[in-house]
Amino acid sequence: TAQRETHGFQTEVGKLLHLVTHSLYSNKEIFLRELVSNAADAADKLRFKALSDNSLYENNGELRVRITADKDAGTLTISDNGIGMTRDQVIEHLGTIAKSGTSEFFNQLSGDESKDSQLIGQFGVGFYSAFIVADRVTVRSRAAGFGAEAGVQWESAGEGDFTVEDVEKSDRGTDIILHVRDEEKEFLDDWRLRQIVNKYSDHISIAVEMWKEEVPERDGPDGEKVAAEPATWEKVNTAKALWTREKSELSDDEYGEFYRHISHDFEAPLTWSHNRVEGTHDYTSLLYIPKRAPFDMWNREAKHGLKLYVQRVFIMDDAEQFMPTYLRFVKGVLDSNDLPLNVSRELLQDNRVTDAMRKACTKRVLQMLEKLAKKDADKYQEFWKEFGNALKEGPAEDAANKEKIAGLLRFASTETDTTDQTVALADYIERMKEGQDKIYYVVADSFNAAKSSPHLEVFRKKGVEVLLMSERVDEWLISHLNEFDGKQLVSVTRGALDLGELEDDADKEAQKALEESSESLVERIKTALGENVKDVRVTHRLTSSPACIVVDEHDMSSQMVKMMKAAGQ
Ligand code: ADP
Ligand code: MG
């Protein structure tokens, strides 16, 4: 009846395991962080489910994770009394990777281990990191709400396959048993384990316990007797939800470790903002900007959003209602005292509390970015490289914050003439020529096409800066961003070029004379091109090219026409 079955890992898991076991990590100890993190997630999930069914606690609501090393057996066990897993869940969760875009991700891997290790860090290895230090892993689990006979045992040597069989397990929850490799025996050392837990798992909101041996009666410093301490389970972390603690008592490292726990990212965050809000609404937010874009940022189905808690109780991951799409890279926690504990995704939709928090969180993020840009331009540039294209969706999505977002945008321009997008609209305005009242830009298919556009000739001649745009999203951005700081944004390829005050009288006269002397030529070209063009005009835009195509003031730009064509319209 034990029903022992062998299953093959999903192809991607196989590849991941190969990377893990071929010493991807110089930082082996992180396996413990991953396993403790999973245990804490399992506790969160049980607490949430128990809100509507208290019997799931089975009279034991004291949630904790215990770490036990057995030097003789060479095993390290991480044991939790969280939600547990059924047989089907074990097969699914410990045999496949559920993230969307996983196979595309693996196709990107180059085979060069050092490059791939960076990529894999962003992807996160989670449970599979157990194989960094173990040559065999046994998982025993029993889901909350089932009897002891519903236990299941999973086992694998981390190669092609794993086995599952039914077992008796009276305690609810999951034991992860690592058969530690001979050369990794340091991870069975009590002191070493405590050190790792302190370093990585202090902020975990459930107790992480380790067995403490009895301390016999002994002599105190003043000759008095100090009583014996009995052997006991000892809590080795703070076990207090990090966001409930005072900012002043939290170190950057602690914020960093908490970020890794909630984001499944292996890198430190770029920056964060931690706020307690009281008044009409009562909540705490802790919002992080990652260093690197997640591998699936451009995948439409990819999950994003904040981790939602209500009165310290975990409610859901990826609550996307609290962040606009253009800020989908933001990670963090929101803990509300106003929402009901039984709040669902549906309830979050069209909810006044949700709307207020979303507005406030959006503002926080924009402020955090403004601050970063002001304080540390290099770091801001790092941010821009990773997330600039997402932020460019902002003006279209979030009209209320258009001006703020526009202030955060960075562009390439004729001033710098490099592909680096470093020019802020405010920088541009500062450099505007005497008499210039508009912000000029050009959009093209590539940076080089933008940079060498014949439309720029007159601007270069007059020393007027032009923003060079060539990202796919730029056309979309610019169609929703008409002005900044009271200055209109104008395409250099559009309509009759009006350089306003920038033109002097001599320019205008020369222009007029040229128009008159060219009348018959213009007529001949018009006849020759016929229906293909709307109009033919003499221009002073060009200094070295003989002719160029312009788009009429209110017509679609040539970029937009191309995009529509590509979309089959
Ligand atoms: P992630 O934590 O990012 O989801 P992991 O690889 O760490 O990815 O874990 C995969 C899945 O396995 C988890 O999402 C969870 O469903 C399940 N799991 C892992 N460890 C436990 C545990 N201790 N208790 C219950 N479920 C677990
Ligand atoms: Mg995990």
Image: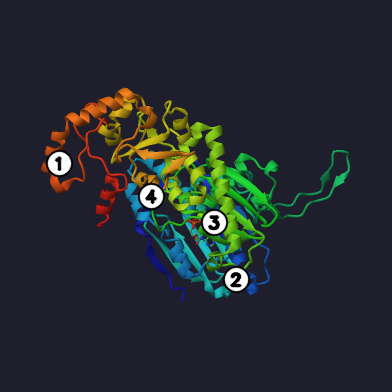
Q: Closer to us: mark 4 or mark 3? A: 3
Q: Which residue is mark 3?
A: 322
Q: Closer to us: mark 4 or mark 1? A: 1
Indicate which disc, 3 or 1, sits on the residue closer to the N terminus: 3
Q: Is mark 3 within 8 Å of ligand 1?
A: no
Determine which quarter of the picture holds residue 300.
bottom left
The CA distance from mark 3 to mark 2 is 40 Å
Residue type highlighted by circle 3: Phe
Q: Closer to us: mark 4 or mark 2? A: 4
Asked if the residue at tag 2 contacts the one at tag 3, i.e. Cβ–Cβ closer than 8 Å, the answer is no
The CA distance from mark 3 to mark 1 is 56 Å
Left or right side of 449 for 386: right
Q: Is mark 4 within 8 Å of ligand 1?
A: no
Residue type highlighted by circle 4: His
Indicate which disc, 4 or 2, sits on the residue closer to the N terminus: 4
User: Viewer-proximal residue, 494 or 184?
Assistant: 494
- The numbered dot on residue 526 is 1
Residue type highlighted by circle 1: Lys
Q: Position of residue 16 (x, y in %)?
A: 39, 51
Indicate which disc, 3 or 2, sits on the residue closer to the N terminus: 2
Q: Position of residue 545 (x, y in %)?
A: 21, 29
The CA distance from mark 4 to mark 1 is 67 Å
Q: Position of residue 511 (x, y in %)?
A: 26, 28
Q: Residue at x 63, y 63 (%)?
A: 339
Q: Which residue is mark 4?
A: 18
| Label 2 CA crowd tier, 10 Å (few <14, some 14–19, many 20+) | some
Q: Closer to us: mark 2 or mark 1? A: 1
